[in-house]
Amino acid sequence: MVAARITVNGEETPLSPAPAHTTVLDLLRERGLTGTKEGCAEGECGACSVLVARPGVDRPTDWVAVNACLIPAAALDGQEIVTSEGLATPGEPGRPPRLHPVQEEMAVRGGSQCGYCTPGFVCSMAAEYYRPGRCAHADASAPDDPEHGPNGFDLHALSGNLCRCTGYRPIRDAAFAVGEPTDEDPLARRREEEPPAPVATEYVREGREFLRKGTLAETVRVLRELPETVVVAGSTDWGVEVNIRSRRADRVIAIDRLPELRELRVESDHIEIGAALTLTEVERRLDGAVPLLAELFPLFASRLIRNSATLGGNLGTGSPIGDAPPALLALEASVLLADADGEREVPLSDYFTGYRRSVRRPDELIRAVRVSLPLSPVVAFHKIAKRRFDDISSVAVAFALDIEDGIVRKARIGLGGVAATPIRALAAEAALEGGAWSVENVETTARVLQGEGTPMSDHRAGAEYRSAMLGQSLLKLYAQTTEAVSS
């Protein structure tokens, strides 16, 4: 077994002697790359952002920004990353490095003050700078879009980065000022080469180990023999446990690069989404083919989190406030569970059994999520939270309706945040089906929907508020559909 190592800014960096639970952030700082900062230690501030070379959607490699504070360093064994220090071009002897274009724009436009958050912003901005498909608006007279620059820069790329000093306007100015990568840009050229292939990893330190197997069959055999093994994909949940709650596992196994979990197939009667595809990969590969998921993705945490998080992980944690389950319930999705003996399909409506519990056994993995076709034409995802983006849901509601000639032929409604598990709003679905899509029936059903689940009061919202938001969500959907028809 080759010693575990990561290529950092073009140089190989061994993991040893770091403990098995060491994060990428801690490894970098211990090796002197202190531009990468720790702010929140749970993936909300972006001060730790770095670039990782990942399989591209439209070309061999994409530069993807991720939270270094959440990812175990051993999970990037054999991989290639670039930190804020590695973006600049080395200068001639006796001369300082030449700033990267995003660094230059941040400097000249006043996007940095205390500087603590700046390296993270720069790395997230660089990922958007190199994003395939980013281009200037062809029509200079196009209406002003505060979230997209004239250079095609999507400000949502920075939704996971926080700054306490600048008020964000100069950062936005810097983002909207960057041009296109030049032919001489080494990181732009690097996109045309294949990313590093996943390597089998067996990193053992101080009695704890981090594993990565080459195939699904090998992985589920480990889980059959050692069912207490912690499974990680993007590590956006486990990383918080390690950092904030000081959790340590004797054995962790990574599944995020297993090829069997990274397929996306569109068949005549279903779409199958690999459980280890990141949400960003799913979003870009589907390209709007599942409109309800297209509504979900921008509201799911931040781009930094979506660059690592997976549908399998979101379902595997079993959280009642996860954003994906309500949408997948409305889509009548099922999960494909694999173990050493084979595979079984479980409707998502039967998957959750209690608070953070499910029918999945310790020796099983979620291989894929299957969405049935055809899709319902009327869909919506409403997330009620204290912030518009990058926040945890107080309530999440997903709708998928078939309405023909003014009659609701089919209704599926998924709910999050109102019970110990994500649930279907069965009573409200029954109240809608067969009735007219009219203000009277919608108002009646809204009262039914308010009674779904067993909402509780906590620091995010009160029980009465949660119930009220369920009813308001249906009224909002009705208003949206009637506005669309009248316009």
Image (spheres, grey):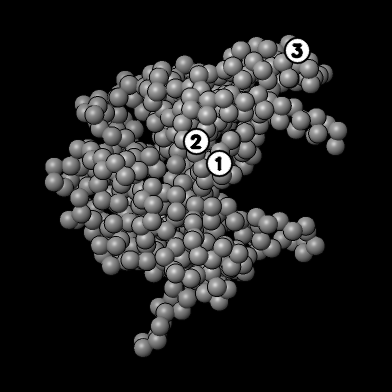
Residue 366 visible, this angle? no
Alpha carbons under labels 2 and 1: distance apart: 8 Å
Which labelled disc corresponds to residue 435? 3
Query: Up-down: is 394 above or below 54?
Result: above
Q: Earlier in the sequence, mark 3 or mark 1?
A: 1
Tag 3 and tag 1, C-beta contact below 8 Å = no
Q: Position of residue 223 (x, y in %)?
A: 26, 28
Nearer the viewer's eye, disc 2 or disc 3? 2
Left-right relation of 335 to 381: left
Give amino acid for label 1.
Lys
Instruction: Determine the secondary structure under disc 2.
Output: loop
Around disc 3, counting alpha carbons within 10 Å, would you say few (fewer than 14), some (14 to 19), or many (20 or more)?
A: some
Name the residue nearer the viewer: 255 or 264: 255
Give amino acid for label 2.
Arg
Around disc 2, counting alpha carbons within 10 Å, would you say few (fewer than 14), some (14 to 19), or many (20 or more)?
A: few
Residue matched to label 1: 386
Residue matched to label 2: 460
Tag 2 and tag 1, C-beta contact below 8 Å = yes
Alpha carbons under labels 3 and 1: distance apart: 34 Å
Name the residue nearer the viewer: 66 or 253: 66
Instruction: Determine the secondary structure under disc 3.
Output: loop
Q: Earlier in the sequence, mark 2 or mark 3?
A: 3
Q: Which residue does the image show at 48% across and 28% down from the upper left?
A: 457
Left-right relation of 185 to 116: right
Q: Quadrant of residue 474?
A: top right
Alpha carbons under labels 2 and 3: distance apart: 35 Å
Q: Which residue does the image show at 53% across and 25% down from the upper left?
A: 463
Q: Position of residue 159 (x, y in %)?
A: 54, 52
Q: Earlier in the sequence, mark 2 or mark 1?
A: 1
Tag 2 and tag 3, C-beta contact below 8 Å = no
Give amino acid for label 3.
Gly
